[in-house]
Image (cartoon, grey):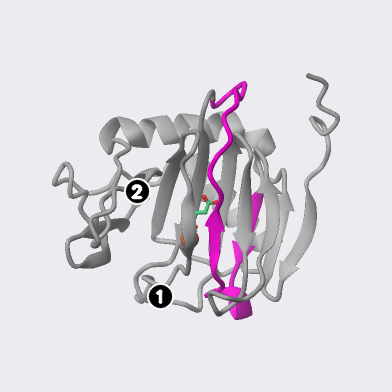
Amino acid sequence: MLDLFADAEPWLEPLAPGAVILRRFALSRAAALFQGIDDVAAVAPFRHMVTPGGYTMSVAMTNCGELGWATNARGYLYSPVDPLTGQRWPQVPTALSELCHDAAVAAGYPDFQPDACLINRYAPGAKLSLHQDKDEANLAAPIVSVSLGLPAIFQFGGLRRQDPLKRLMLEHGDVVVWGGESRLFYHGIQPLKSGDHPEAGAFRYNLTFRQASNSE
Ligand code: SIN
Ligand code: FE2
């Protein structure tokens, strides 16, 4: 397939107050990012977490960094230890942390110091229902979210669940950053359409960098 954007420079699309999409920002580094994801998953495998309500999530997840997002019978939490292995989560691979830093700077958040990186893997049909990212102790820090592999439709709303939703296609290499006024805006991913991506096969991957602890 002819890809007219293969050599294009990244471009910035405003999304909401405090939120931007850095289109194709991660494209030129995708190979190193996939390698980093593979390295993390070799130590902390992808798994389908079960919500406190007993629902098995369709998205497969793992983490790297000081803290990782997980579920247990009581709720959602950030833990320094992977509940599956009993070991600390793997360190964030350099390619991932450098990309996150550069994206945060480009989006106007130069002081962002993430301590958690959640890695999501979507197979066809997998989705993430509308939610707020509010398990982090430091809500002054933004979220940096990197999309790789198959495209997906991202919903981005407002502070209330019933606020109108924007629906945007997120493609391979796109980075969304939201903070400030939009830090707690509802968002989600519609069920993934099947496809065959040259580097990711049947999957979409998403990295979200967060500052989960309040220490900084
Ligand atoms: C998330 O909301 O944590 C992930 C969003 C995405 O997969 O793009
Ligand atoms: Fe989220």
> Residue shown at 32%/57% (left/top)?
69
Mark 1 surroundings within 10 Å by alpha-carbon count, few (fewer than 14), some (14 through 19), many (20 or more): few
Mark 1 and mark 2 lie on one chain; the one further toward the N terminus is 2
The reply to whether residue 124 is in sight is yes
Q: Position of residue 131 (x, y in %)?
A: 47, 66
Decide: few, some or many residues near mark 2? Use Cα within 10 Å; few <14, some 14-19, many ≥20. Answer: some
Q: Which residues are magenta?
A: 175-200
Residue drawn at point x = 40 percent, y = 44 percent: 59
What residue does disc 1 label? 216
Element under disc 1: loop
Instruction: Please tell me whether residue 2 is drawn above or below residue 67 in the rendered image.
Output: above
Q: Is residue 142 above or below residue 124?
A: below
Identity of the amino acid at label 2?
Met
> Which residue, as the protein is rendered here, is positioned at the far left?
86
Observer-nearest residue: 154 or 138? 154
The residue that disc 2 covers is 57
Q: Position of residue 117 (x, y in %)?
A: 42, 53
Residue 116 vertical position relative to residue 38 in the rendered view, above or below? below
In percent of the image, x 39 and y 57: which residue is there?
116
Q: Nearer the viewer, residue 77 or 35?
A: 77
